[in-house]
Amino acid sequence: MPTIFSKIISGELPSDIVYRDDLVTAFRDINPLAPTHILIVPNKEIATVNDLTDDDERIAGRLFLAARRIAEQEGIAQDGYRLIVNCNRDGGQEVYHLHMHLLGGRPIGPMVVRH
Ligand code: AMP
């Protein structure tokens, strides 16, 4: 079964795609938590950070390079932004297709809420 993000990447599900290359695709989060909230997703299905292998080094690097380009494109590079990757239950991961959140357009606030 393809993941929901694979269906977005293949065009089977609608989305607002802002960037695409041979390794990653980026689209706007359906439930944005900031004026800019974009998900950067490997085109290949990798479930979590735990599932990355040495062969995925270019993909892992490309997530950051795509984030840099998209931040420029969105006009938030200078003011700044936050990149988040959640892993498994304690990380709060909901979609098991590796993705990097790019959040900006306002001060994003404390890194982690203290409990
Ligand atoms: P995470 O908790 O890191 O797994 O984040 C999953 C993110 O995917 C959430 O911020 C959701 O709002 C987002 N999301 C889920 N379904 C879609 C969709 N169809 N299009 C865009 N974003 C989605």
Image (cartoon, grey):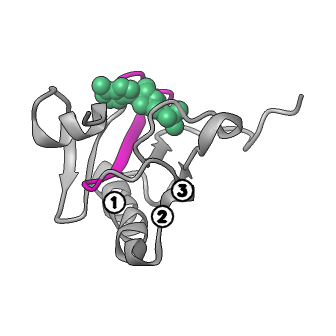
Quadrant of residue 89 in the image? top right
Magenta-colored stretch includes residue 31: yes
Q: Does 68 appear above or below 16?
A: below
Disc 3 Cβ-to-ligand 1 distance below 8 Å:
no
Q: Name the residue under label 1.
A: 72
State the CA–CA distance, disc 2 to disc 3: 5 Å
**Front tag of 1 and 2:** 2
Residue lying at 25% horizontally and 36% vertically, measured from the top left: 2
Residue 81 visible in the current orientation: yes
Query: What amino acid type is highlighted by mark number 2?
Result: Leu
User: Which residues make up the magenta segment?
Assistant: 30-44
Query: What amino acid type is highlighted by mark number 1?
Result: Glu
Magenta-colored stretch includes residue 40: yes
Query: What amino acid type is highlighted by mark number 3?
Result: Val
Q: Mark 3 points at which residue?
A: 49
| Spot occupied by residue 63 in the image (x, y as percentages of width and height) | 39, 62
Q: Are marks 2 and 3 in contact (CB under 8 Å)?
A: yes
Q: Does 75 appear above or below 36?
A: below
Could you tell which of marks 3 and 1 lies nearer the N-terminus? 3
Secondary structure under tag 1 reads helix
Q: Name the residue under label 2.
A: 52
Disc 1 Cβ-to-ligand 1 distance below 8 Å:
no
Secondary structure under tag 3 reads helix
Residue 80 visible in the current orientation: no
